[in-house]
Amino acid sequence: MKQLDPYVAGMTWGFMGVRGTWGNEEASVSMETMVDTTGANWIAIAFSALQATAFSTEIPYRNEPTVSDEEVRWAVKKSKSLGLKVCLKPIVNCADGTWRAHINFFDKDVPCEPKWRDWFASYNDYILHFAKIAEETGCEMLCIGCEMVQTDRRESEWRNLISEVRKVYGGLVTYNCDKYQEDNIAWWDALDLISSSGYYPIDDWDAQLDRIESVVKRYNKPFFFMEAGCPSRTGSAAIPNDWTLQGEANQAEQADFYRVMFQKCGKRDWVRGFMLWDWPAKLYAREEAANNDDYCVYGKEAEKVVYGTYSTMLRITK
């Protein structure tokens, strides 16, 4: 079994990319710039397939706008050329805008109603397709799901998927649970790593880390934050998961959030790192950073915070 690095200094790259936006010079420069300005040693290559609604049972991942297999292979190859270790992260979203956490069906089958078994059949096909590509391209990690809160209770289906993934993929396997859900997953034992989304209010990190620590101890598995971050927007440090929050662009607030997060997590030796959210395949111009209020740290005060923390952690964990 492959082992997780002592520290994951990671970034999430490419999410919201649609077919035709990867595999070009713009995407190449974006990834190169990410490595240069953050000091990352890991990358989570994230992309999504769209099911129509939260109650649809078909995930048409071979169709647009999902990036093509060729684009995924390009992104892995490019990452490897930059010395990065790779986590492949296929995600499901809903085309109507409903957050994926609300994908849900009746626990008992009802005639003429959509069913869990049909959804999981389609989802398994999607994940196994990219598990094979992850194996073929040498990805060190595969994330088999992201923030799918209503599905988390379907333990037998998840255990079955993990078993099927291991037949075709030999790297590390994890699941990215949503914030506050770490202690609601009953099947961490079947995975290699525990990972979650670290969008916790700036003044609540200690309490949440105490809670998560009990889960890590119970399962005795390595832990890292598969997502974590904060928009550069006034008010976002108190509710970093709300990408719709209205507020002025605010680099200082984002930088403060990162300082506190790194400082609090740095006191817990069981936190093995981050795949920070996020870095787009099409990067805005550096001179536009002051007016950009999204999660990306490029050209912002938080960029130096990330680079400084990652450089220090990689040096002391060698």
Image: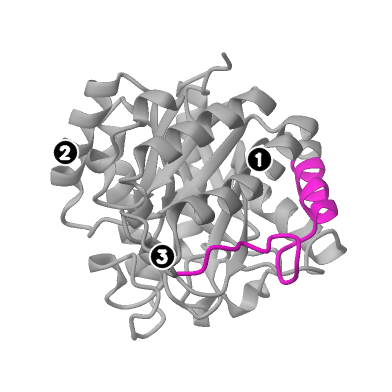
Residue 311 seen? no
Picture quadrant of residue 263: top left
Numbered disc total? 3
Label 2 and label 3: CA atoms lie apart by 41 Å
* Marks 1 and 2, the one that precedes in the sequence: 1
Residue pictured at 54% horizontal, 41% vertical? 143
Q: Pointers 2 and 3 in contact (CB under 8 A)?
A: no
Q: Return the residue nearer the eye: 230 or 142.
A: 142
Q: Return the residue nearer the eye: 260 or 136.
A: 136
Disc 1 marks which amino acid? Leu
Disc 3 marks which amino acid? Pro
Q: Which residue is mark 3?
A: 111
Residue 237 location (% of width, % of height): 28, 66
Residue 134 location (% of width, % of height): 71, 36
Q: Which residue of the protein is positioned furthest toward the front in this rendering?
A: 111
Q: Which residue is mark 2?
A: 211
Label 1 and label 3: CA atoms lie apart by 28 Å
For label 1, the SS is: helix
Looking at the image, is 263 positioned above or below residue 237? above
Residue pictured at 60% horizontal, 68% vertical? 50
* Marks 1 and 3, the one that precedes in the sequence: 3
Left or right of 189, for residue 166: right
For label 3, the SS is: loop
Label 1 and label 2: CA atoms lie apart by 32 Å
Crowd around label 1: few <14 · some 14–19 · many ≥20 (10 Å): many
Left or right of 283, for residue 70: right
Kindly identify which numbered label has been placed on residue 128. Answer: 1
Q: Return the residue nearer the eye: 70 or 35.
A: 70
For label 2, the SS is: helix
Left or right of 260, for residue 173: right
